[in-house]
Image (cartoon, helix red, strand yellow):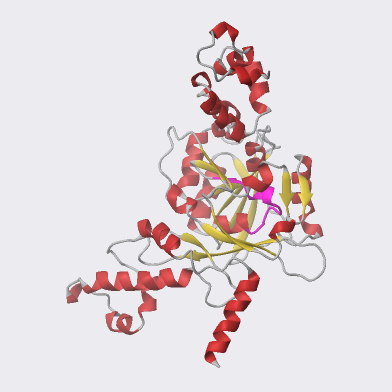
Amino acid sequence: MSAFQKVGNPTRASDDRSPLVDFLAKPDQYVPMFDAITRSLEPSDLKTLSRVSQDLRGVYQKTKDTQWNVNTALKKFVTKPEEFRNKLGQNSAFIAGVFAMDFFDRNPVGNSLDLQVHLGEQGDAVEKYLIDEGFTEDIRPGDPPTVFYKTQYFQHCKKTRLWISILQSMDHPLDQVLRGVWGTTAGTVFMTATKAYAPFADMTLKTKKAYCMRPLDYEGRDELSYVKARGYELLDTRFKDRGKTRLRRLNDSSSWIMALDTTHIAPPSTPDYVLEHAEFLVTCSTNRRGPLHYRIMLRELKHAGLAHEWIVAHDWTVAGLGRVEPIARRLDALVFMELCDLPREDLPENWDELQHRKELLQTMTGYKGRLFDEKIPEWLQELNHPLLPSRRKKWVHMLAKLFRRS
């Protein structure tokens, strides 16, 4: 009989149960044994233990507090981790890269911390925080900033072995992470001020297999070496995924979202529910020869009728299968109806033009009516049925349209 087979019998005397249960039920009393046992268990196993016995209900939470403690990990880089996380939350910035990989794998964090943030005011605010924290920018040739992105490297003035990089981009940070800036599915993990996300937990963290998220090239060798050094098996794509397109959502069953300790952490400027309902399409590259890799298709949804920027799955390859346009057009209608309730003197200056070109409502400024962010998850669910799951069906769909026209 295994050690855990004795756990679930509530009628058995306490002195007859396995000593392994005591090691787990009293973590503060048996710290070395608790750490040794829990580090050998997957997160899903830790959660299962909480359902086995009342004495083990606190195992997962205790493991989170000790082995996935974000403040302890960040203390190596900043003097006030909570303050730093609040700054990230205010500016919708992500922690990504090697730090996030080590955090999820419960490894000691290294000497580098990678941040991703919008180019502009948000990036400037994070940059200023690092300078005030004692970091100085190391100007490196060969990667000059553009109007679309900027990469910066900061070294601590006293702890010279510590480095923080900031990737500022016009794209949403989630766009950068999912499209493979870190090379593999293992590198898609990231952290916000309040939560940690592993979008491909089912095929990567559980199996220790990392799949390519961009074409293989010599420039990406560092990212691949980081993953390989952490014990992952590097592969191109899963055979069963080839020729298929999957609709994914960040909070679906294939992901793992870990709530972080939010003591002294203010609500982030982008609410958790907005990010967790971000959706994207996953498909494989279509090159006829050579290695394959996964491709992510998504699009940012911005509108005057929304308080936040949403990420919506979008197929650029086949016309008519986008999910952004129908939502944007519905928002056009709802915002227009809101404006129709205003007195004439409160209407926008270009009201006559808006009546004929309602798409201009998407970028209008000064709108103070009702916002519709809480409706986006419902509308995305409503759109699920038209999305075609495979490329073959997409071609059938296109041919059917052509025959109808002829």
In the image, taking residue 82 as reference, residue 390 lies left or right, namely right
Q: Nearer the viewer, residue 270 or 345?
A: 270
Asked if residue 379 lies left or right of residue 368, the reply is right
Q: Is residue 237 left or right of residue 82?
A: right
The residue shown at (67%, 62%) is 144
Residue 6 rendering spot, x and y as whole percentages? 60, 17
Residue 16 visible in the picture? yes
Residue at the image position 64 percent from the left and 53 percent from the top? 152
Give the position of the C terminus as an image quadrant: bottom right
How many numbered circles does the render carry? 0
Q: Name above or below for residue 82 compared with residue 314.
A: above
Image quadrant in which you'd find residue 140: bottom right
| Bounds of the magenta segment | 179-191
Q: Is residue 196 above or below residue 22?
A: below
- Viewer can see residue 364: no
In front here: 56 or 143? Answer: 56
